[in-house]
Image (cartoon, rainbow, N blue to C red):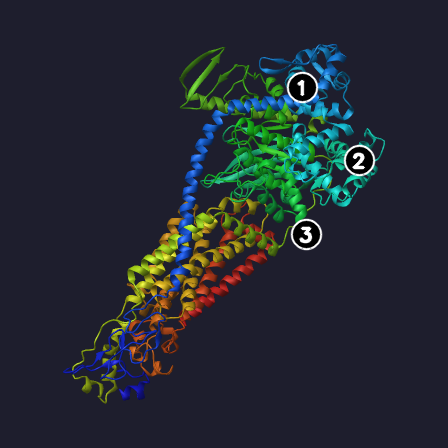
Amino acid sequence: QDKAKELFKIGDIHGGAFCPENERSLRNCPVGSYCEDAGTIKPCPKGFFCPHKTRIPQIRCQNCGIGATQFQRQAYGYFVFGIPVAAILIYILYCACRNMVMKDKERRKILEIRLINAEHEREIKNKRRSQIELIRPKLHDIAERLGLSHIVKEGEQGIELEAEALFAKIDKSGDGFLSYDEIKKALNLKDVQSKEFVSIMNSRSESQGADSVEAGVFADLFLETMIRCSNFDPSPEDAAELYDCIYKEQLDADGDMINLNKLFDTRLSFFLSQKQIHDMIKMIKEANSSTSTLDVSSNQKQSLPQKKSMKHVFNSAMKDSFNSASNVNNETIGRQGFISIYPQVLFSVIQGNSIIPRGVDITFVDISLHINIGGNSTPVVDSVTGRLREKTMTAIMGGSGAGKTSLLNSLCGRAFYGKVTGNIFINGNQTTISEIKDSIGFVPQDDIVYSELTVLENFIFTGKFQLPVGTPIAHIEDLAHETIANLGLVNVAHNIVGDVTRRGVSGGEKKRVSIGLELMSKPSILFLDEPTSGLDASSAMLVMTVLRNLVDKQGVTVCCVIHQPRKFIYDLFDCLILLGVGGKMVYHGPSNKAKEYLNNLNYELPPGESVADWLIDISSGRLKPNKKLRRVESAGSTRKSITNSSFDIGNAPNSDFEEAKLNRAELYRKWCEHYEKLDHNALSFYKAPDSFPLPGSKSKPNFGKQLLHHVQRNFLVMKRNTESKLIDTAVMIMASVIIALMDGPLDLTREWHPHINDEFDVLTQNEIKYFIDWLPQLFKYAFKNSEPIEYAMKVGVITSVLIGLSATKVLTEKRLEFFRESGSGYNINAYFLAVNITSSVEHGSQLIFCAGISLWLRNSARSGLSYILNYISLGWICISWALLFPLIVPPKNVVLVTGFFMTFFGLLLSGALSPVLYEDLYDDKNTELAIISGLFSPTRYFIETMTVSEQRTLPAQSGFTVITSEAASLYNNATSFDLIGLAQNDMPDVTVQSSGGWFWGEWRSFLVGCTVRFAAFLALNICYRAKQAKVPFLKEMVTNRSALIAFNMMFIAFAAFLSLSVYYILN
């Protein structure tokens, strides 16, 4: 024993042993006791824990009593961890019960809706009656002036309007149309009222932009239009009456003031759209806050009914109202101020913006798109020539396989999955579509929005990313509110958008939200892929009306793929591009001329059939000219020959394929002939205009700003998903608790006695080799205890799987949102760095909580800080891999690949389980295996660190620790760490007794995690380029210098971290 101290400096190897009577060998002091010498056994004092073979109590245990045989848990843990765990479980149960209650409420709501339908109809009738009461004096005056006894009367179905009689009385010419002047004179309308009357009627009829109204439209829409127009150009008395009505409707009005933000649900909604009400609120607020004048054009000033200037009227209103003591903010307005300012604001709102900036005009010549199918280049768009005229709305139509979406992608610069050829002229300038990418908006077919955010939040965040640098947040919010009003979303502005798992806005509203995201970037041209797909007729009409208003009111050029539109929707379009199978042109021109063109080719529209369906049938080759209503179906389907009302159904002959193909070929040939014969004037419709400036580029927020916005949005989304996150956390906690309870408190040692015969003779030999050979027998009680490493392996593998699967969701669930934003020009590296930050915070917090509970249940001998840091390091690596897999693995396989990777590599390459053991990993002959394990096994360092940290708390007589750090090298590889193959690259430092933990693996975990994350950055920039609407990777590296520099910097960082990781793995 003295020789061991002197030569090997490993301490008192017999310390903590005692010698029983009548025994020739020493025995290890039992757990719960300590042996100061070989003849004394004493119980472990209070506040300490004494494992086997303890000589002097050193391991502290606050709750351990005298002679405690295992660690005792701290009392505070029951409160620190019990209360949060109980709160999580209660919250989860609450959410489950709430969901059940909500489903029950929905069922009851459906029943209630059915029961109150009659009452609702009465309310509608009452509202209609109220609206009519507002204009009854006006209708009475009209009837007297025209010699009619009445216009409105009470009938069996309620209020009935004799609009046909009124129309016949006004229509002196009897041609079935009322001109602008006839309406103005007969109804005694002022200029602004009569113009708006015709505009409203035309917006709801086929006669877009006409100066007259037909009889049927007049009869259907007269009452609604009259209600709206009668409120235009009000007198001060009308304004006072309106104010009093609004004041009564706002039950929570502040004193004698009305709230401007609550005007949307007042009488104003009878005759103004949500956009017009929004504009009115905005104008009043601006005047309220700054007493500035309202800007109007000279033409508008001349048409004002008052002789006073707008400036005089507004300044007068300021003196009368806005500067009064009663008006304390710009959210409210008093009666006098409203009466003074309302007529002028209403006039400006009705007139709208008289100056619409020039839009974007795109002319395309011989545009083709070829994609590689089976090694062959196949055209999906074939030499198409046409034009998207500025400030117009163009439809792309055709049957299946006609290349509609392919043409749309080719025109908006998103067809990177193939090769696009041809010439593009933008505003008369030959260039590429990438030159105006900041002025393009693209709305995909799917409604891809952040379902966890409200409508307003979606728009504001989009504005932060898309609007130029330096745009004040107040301007972004104002644009968001304006967009909401333009899209008719005021009533759902603060509602969650929702998805299949949470109730939100309706399908039509969600489609408008998707459109609004693009409008937040203020585009000059908007491309849409089937905007009416999946919508009912009413919602589809509302969406398309919004797009029509964008063209008319804001001068946005709109182009969209449309599938089987109803007649009203078809009539909204100015131009039509009709494609046949293979992406060839069948017709291109004004939408209202398509029928005429095809009639000239001997195609006839059957009575009662939709024009759009008829066009698609023709373009597909299913209809033949001169064969009225004869349809040629594809093989395997039925062939229908419709004559009058009879149907003959039989098997389709094989020749139908060829017949349809010949029909299409004839259509293509006819169009080419038609195009070549166009005269100069007609050809100007398709030719590029005289050149005018391209839209200017925008300076979007830099990397740092976008990173901040992404982080803010990610945390908000995380907050809205609290229930899901808590369930994930509860599962992880449950796993930690179950494993800890199954394994019980930490056992540092086990019951083992050396049983060395003639122990004195063996340990007093002069030959050192005899001494070394017998040392393992003395240390077996510590290093043969496999419990620490088994526990670490269970916890490490299960936790890595749970964290890995949970961390993949942030990318897999928002995959489509990422693709859309990437195509819109967002900085993808800022997005991914934000995901790294928020994921690390989220899952790091979960792991800290799990580590705390595990530490409390496990009663570790090491410090709590090192225990928690061990968990965080495991999470760092697992999250890194979980963020890489969604970028390189198909989404359907991500879960399987992640689970397999964490389990397979976490078990078989960790070093804790055969066939790969720690002694193999530290063998100089197995450097490749060591590198593979260090880089790919998520539990490689977690298991070893957790095991070594516990074992180095033991005293020197355990064999794991020594008296001085030099002792391990003198010990000739015979410490307990050497015997089980742990921590071989940290000798001799690891042999110093310490309860502070072992941090050799933490630095390596950090380096490996950084390596994997930079690999993910590289994969982000290389993979799925087409889905991100980006040019191929190699092409971008050649053409985009900034992208090349950024990628090279990431690659250098990846190479640096990889080199450092390999170096430290081997050293």
Outermost residue toward the right? 307
What x and y, as percent, mark residue 138?
73, 19
Is the residue under label 1 in contact with that under label 3 (CB below 8 Å)?
no
How many numbered marks are there? 3
Name which quarter of the figure residue 220 lies in: top right
What x and y, as percent, mark residue 405?
54, 35
Tag in front: 3 or 1: 1
Report which residue position mark 2 lands on.
Answer: 297
Who is closer to the viewer here, 945 or 672? Answer: 945
Tag in front: 1 or 2: 1
Marks 3 and 1, the one that precedes in the sequence: 1
Who is closer to the viewer here, 739 or 79? Answer: 79
Report which residue position mark 1 lands on.
Answer: 222
Marks 1 and 2, the one that precedes in the sequence: 1
Q: CA distance from mark 1 to mark 2?
A: 31 Å
Check the picture and name the quadrant holding the C terminus: bottom left
Mark 3: few/some/many CA within 10 Å (<14, 14-19, 20+) = few
Report which residue position mark 3 lands on.
Answer: 470
Who is closer to the viewer here, 924 or 701? Answer: 701
Q: CA distance from mark 3 to mark 1?
A: 48 Å
Label 2 element class:
loop
Residue for point 59% across, 26% down: 569
Type of amino acid at the residue the image marks with label 2:
Ser
Marks 2 and 3, the one that precedes in the sequence: 2
Mark 2: few/some/many CA within 10 Å (<14, 14-19, 20+) = few
Type of amino acid at the residue the image marks with label 1:
Phe
